[in-house]
Image: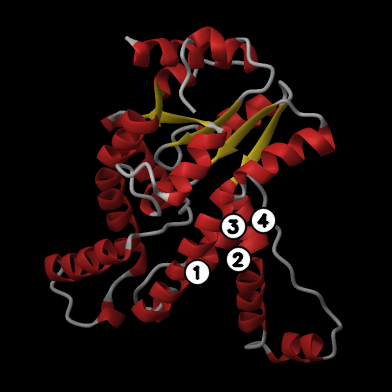
Amino acid sequence: MLFKSADEFVKAERRTVTVFGMAGVGKTRLSNMLRASRWFHYSADYRIGTRYMGEYIVDNFKREAMKVPFLANLLRSDSIYISSNITFDNLDPLSSYLGTPGNPDKGGLPLAEYQRRQEQHRVAEIAALQDVPHFIERAKELYGYDNFIADTGGSLIEVIDPANPEDPVIKTLAASTALLYIRGTDKDAAELVRRFRKSPKPMYYHPPFLVEKWAEYKALNKIAEDCDVDPAGFGAWGFEALLHDRLPRYQMLADNFGYVVEASDLAIVRDGDEFVDLMASAIEKRMR
């Protein structure tokens, strides 16, 4: 959805935007703020963790609980109920299910199991992104929202081809929303790595990239066996490598199909009107 002028967006009766960029750059902060200005907030990660991976997540909780005899007996007799309390701002249930490959004694997953869960996430993410048009209409019909923002995960770029206009996810999103890249700086990237070490987010690696970086990490650290890899060490190192690998592809997606705003400019936006102004500036910049 590209506009002929900034006014076309500003004066539109209904505005629909999909924001994308690296994890932690401000997509969810913006979306939460816009909710106060009568925008419907669609979180792709929340949809993944509830509609498409909720059963996997809860079954994993139950699997761990069954290792405790006291809880196992209560589960078998339906005396207790286990559920996931995932929210827009707390994706820990999804993160804990996806996990990190490495030493099981340190909380890691065997690489094959990690790859199996990664594939589940890939399928779920594509489905959640293709649900966007349905939720645009649902937001209007059920709740009366004219404005809609789709808050995507950092891994959106891993499940599309940013150069292909026939990519099914791109076709879906570009037909129904304006694509907006929130672009960070190298300083932002360093801060995101620091925050990731403290509080990991759900991570999805394109399969060949995961295999390549897994082998590279083992070689750099002179590790022979998968089970000897420190999951926390690989998680932080892999996140940083993935972050830098994604940046040019985010830019390619924006160049081909959308718009760009700087994370520093977005950080000072206070409400829906100021966001519309910022979006208008991004449209004018592309037109120039």
Whether tag 2 and tag 1 are in contact, CB under 8 A, the answer is yes
Q: Residues within 10 Å of mark 4 (few under 14, many from 20)?
A: some
Q: Check disc 2 and give the amino acid type.
A: Met
Badge 2 is on which residue? 53
97 lies left or right of 86 = left
Q: Distance of mark 2 from mark 1, alpha carbons? A: 8 Å
Disc 1 marks which residue?
Answer: 120
Q: CA distance from mark 4 to mark 1?
A: 18 Å
- In primary-sequence order, the first of circles 2 and 1 is 2
Compared to residue 9, the image places residue 124 above or below, namely: below
Marks 2 and 4, Cα distance to the nearest angstrom? 11 Å
Instruction: Say which label, 1 or 3, has the lower sequence index.
Output: 3
Residue 84 occupies which quadrant of the picture?
bottom right
Residue designated by label 4: 86
What residue appears at the point 41 percent right and 20 percent down from the top-left corner? Answer: 264
Q: Residues within 10 Å of mark 3 (few under 14, many from 20)?
A: many
Name the kind of residue labelled 1 in the image.
Gln
Q: Earlier in the sequence, mark 4 or mark 3?
A: 3
The one nearer the camera, 46 or 52, is 52
In terms of depth relative to the viewer, which is nearer, 210 or 235? Answer: 210
* Residue 104 picture location, percent across and down: 41, 80
Q: Amino acid at mark 4?
A: Ile
Which residue in the structure is indicated by mark 3? 48
Judged by depth in the image, the label closer to the viewer, 4 or 3, is 3
Q: Compare residues 47 and 216 and report the one nearer the observer.
A: 47
SS at mark 3? helix
Quarter in which the C terminus is drawn: top left
Query: What amino acid is found at the position of numbered circle 3 in the picture?
Result: Ile
Are the residues flagged by discs 4 and 3 in contact, CB closer than 8 Å?
A: no
Q: Position of residue 121 (x, y in %)?
A: 49, 63
